[in-house]
């Protein structure tokens, strides 16, 4: 059985994994870069080790240094979280060679699902619906034109080794095929070291819906229902919810069965996600498989009542799944908002800096997975996501209301954040209707970006007024006895405002 876990990650996901380990009585080991010496995951872990300079290539992506720490700390397992080395087949392989349990799938499954062309072939063989498109990589412009004429415009050119929207081009006319093909290949090569691309039919009005799966080492697999992930910007998720307001019970059960079939088709074990693209008529197609824990996994945990990290550790220990499919059901509704240190009104420009003040939302049905604190300086080297705000309520309307309330309570000063933008999403009539797709942000930009950040302006005004009040009182009362000091004019103004 696993006795000590090294968490090969940083930020909120590292802290979140360590919390489950602590509940299981398993000591944890943190690794940190030069930029993360004072980070929360370093403080929270039982042990912490320096692994290199701030750039991730010299620290969190350095397999040799991470394995060296595992040996030094006598950690017998590594949890990779998400991002960094979480879907790196070589890392999984090296862990196995060192006698260290990789808390995730084996290298073969990672390779099979990491290559989108191979994944498509695997799904076709397993009977899982896939988007109409090419089976293999496109090798020439002439081949691309022939396939596009066969499939029909519009199409997507996609990187085989891709993810996160890189190496993708939407093609609406034949005149742009050559430049789109060249651009997708170039971007794919730069991002993934592989310029292989394939072509898929572009689904109009697409919905991005994913199914959480768990599979053990004994051939058992289950799904834990879906997450609606259609609120996206540049193919990056912004808000997620479960259950999806789009699916019917029958389609949900059908998609879940296909998700389980997908996991079994690649001999998967651990936690993973089967992503589907769904049209307005509820036709659905396999998109890709993420062979790791997802950023948005907490909403599944809240609605289904399963700690996914604990399940991953149990699976790594060789324990059969403790749940059968018929044991699981969705209870209530959960929403997650990703909080970024960036300025939505300046084209989402990153806003690194020092946190001056933070007031985290509390109350019934609110969960906050974060890693920043007052006085903490957000590094410029990593993803600007600083926390995830998760709410649960008995139904969707109450969940939206609760998220709006929680976002109103969530105050961070010192850096710009996406909190006001997320609050506007919750106010959007289109979002509230549940009838939205992956074009939601661009199609509702006038509503989402038209309102000034009233909370931020009021907060700035309050800080200025409080400081002026403080200096005025200080000047008049520095030498006066306590009983002769005047009452705060700021307080008097507040009293008059409510008379």
Image: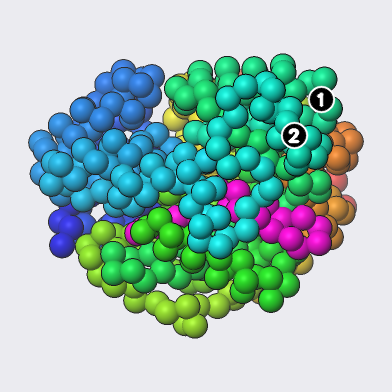
Residue 280 spot, x, y in % from top left: 81, 58
Residue pictured at 13% horizontal, 46% vertical: 99
Q: Residues within 10 Å of mark 2 (few under 14, many from 20)?
A: many
Residue 357 spot, x, y in % from top left: 55, 35
Which range is magenta? 269-289
Seen as rendered, the residue at the extreme bottom is: 326
Residue 298 spot, x, y in % from top left: 51, 58
User: Is 282 included in the stretch rendered in magenta?
Assistant: yes
Magenta portion: prevailing SS class: strand
| Label annotation for residue 148 | 2
Taking depth in this image into account, of 3 and 265 the one nearest to the observer is 265
Q: Is residue 165 above or below residue 1?
A: above
Asked which quadrant contains residue 397, the reply is bottom right
Asked which quadrant contains residue 312, the reply is bottom left
Drawn side of residue 248 relative to residue 482, left or right: right
* Labels 1 and 2 touching (C-beta < 8 A): yes
Callout 2 secondary element: helix
Callout 1 secondary element: helix
Q: Is residue 13 above or below residue 39?
A: below
Residue 489 in sight here: no
Taking depth in this image into account, of 229 and 178 the one nearest to the observer is 178
Q: Residues within 10 Å of mark 1 (few under 14, many from 20)?
A: some
Which quadrant does the N terminus fall into? bottom left
Drawn side of residue 195 relative to residue 64, left or right: right
| Label annotation for residue 174 | 1
């Amino acid at each position: 059985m696993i006795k000590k876990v090294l968490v090969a990650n940083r930020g909120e996901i590292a802290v979140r994994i360590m919390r489950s380990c602590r509940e299981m009585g398993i000591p944890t080991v943190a690794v940190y870069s030069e930029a993360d010496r004072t980070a929360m995951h370093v403080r929270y872990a039982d042990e912490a080790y320096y692994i290199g300079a701030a750039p991730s290539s010299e620290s969190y992506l350095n397999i040799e240094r991470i394995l060296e720490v595992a040996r030094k700390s006598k950690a017998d397992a590594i949890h990779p979280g998400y991002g960094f080395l979480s879907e790196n087949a070589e890392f999984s392989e090296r862990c196995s060679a060192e006698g260290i349990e990789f808390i995730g799938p084996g290298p073969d499954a990672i390779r099979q699902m990491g290559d989108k062309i191979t994944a498509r072939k695997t799904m076709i063989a397993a009977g899982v619906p896939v988007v109409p498109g090419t089976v293999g990589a496109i090798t020439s412009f002439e081949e691309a034109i022939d396939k596009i004429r066969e499939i029909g415009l519009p199409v997507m050119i996609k990187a085989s080794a891709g993810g996160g929207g890189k190496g993708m081009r939407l093609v609406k006319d034949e005149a742009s095929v050559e430049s789109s093909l060249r651009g997708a290949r170039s971007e794919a090569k730069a991002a993934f070291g592989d310029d292989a691309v394939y072509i898929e039919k572009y689904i109009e009005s697409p919905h991005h819906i994913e199914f959480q799966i768990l599979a053990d080492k004994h051939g058992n697999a289950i799904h834990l229902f879906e997450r609606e992930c259609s609120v996206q910007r540049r193919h990056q998720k912004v808000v997620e919810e479960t259950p999806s307001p789009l699916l019917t019970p029958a389609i949900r059960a059908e998609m879940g069965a296909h998700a389980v079939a997908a996991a079994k088709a690649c001999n998967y074990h651990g936690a993973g996600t089967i992503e589907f693209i769904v049209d307005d008529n509820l036709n659905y197609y396999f998109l890709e498989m993420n062979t790791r824990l997802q950023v948005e996994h907490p909403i599944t945990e809240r609605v289904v009542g399963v700690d996914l990290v604990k399940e991953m550790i149990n699976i790594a220990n060789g324990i059969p799944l403790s749940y059968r499919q018929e044991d699981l059901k969705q209870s209530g509704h959960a929403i997650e908002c990703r909080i970024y240190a960036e300025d939505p009104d300046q084209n989402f420009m990153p806003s690194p800096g020092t946190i001056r003040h933070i007031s985290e939302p509390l109350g019934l049905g609110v969960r906050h997975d974060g890693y920043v604190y007052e006085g903490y300086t957000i590094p410029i080297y990593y993803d600007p996501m600083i926390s995830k705000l998760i709410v649960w309520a008995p139904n969707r309307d109450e969940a939206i209301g609760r998220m709006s309330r929680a976002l109103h309570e969530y105050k961070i000063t010192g850096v710009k954040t996406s909190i006001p933008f997320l609050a506007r999403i919750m106010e959007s009539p289109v979002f509230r209707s549940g009838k939205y797709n992956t074009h939601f942000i661009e199609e509702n930009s006038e509503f989402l970006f038209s309102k000034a950040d009233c909370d931020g302006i009021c907060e700035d005004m309050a800080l200025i007024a409080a400081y002026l009040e403080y200096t005025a009182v200080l000047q008049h009362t520095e030498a006066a006895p306590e009983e002769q000091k005047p009452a705060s004019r700021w307080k008097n103004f507040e009293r008059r405002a409510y008379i």
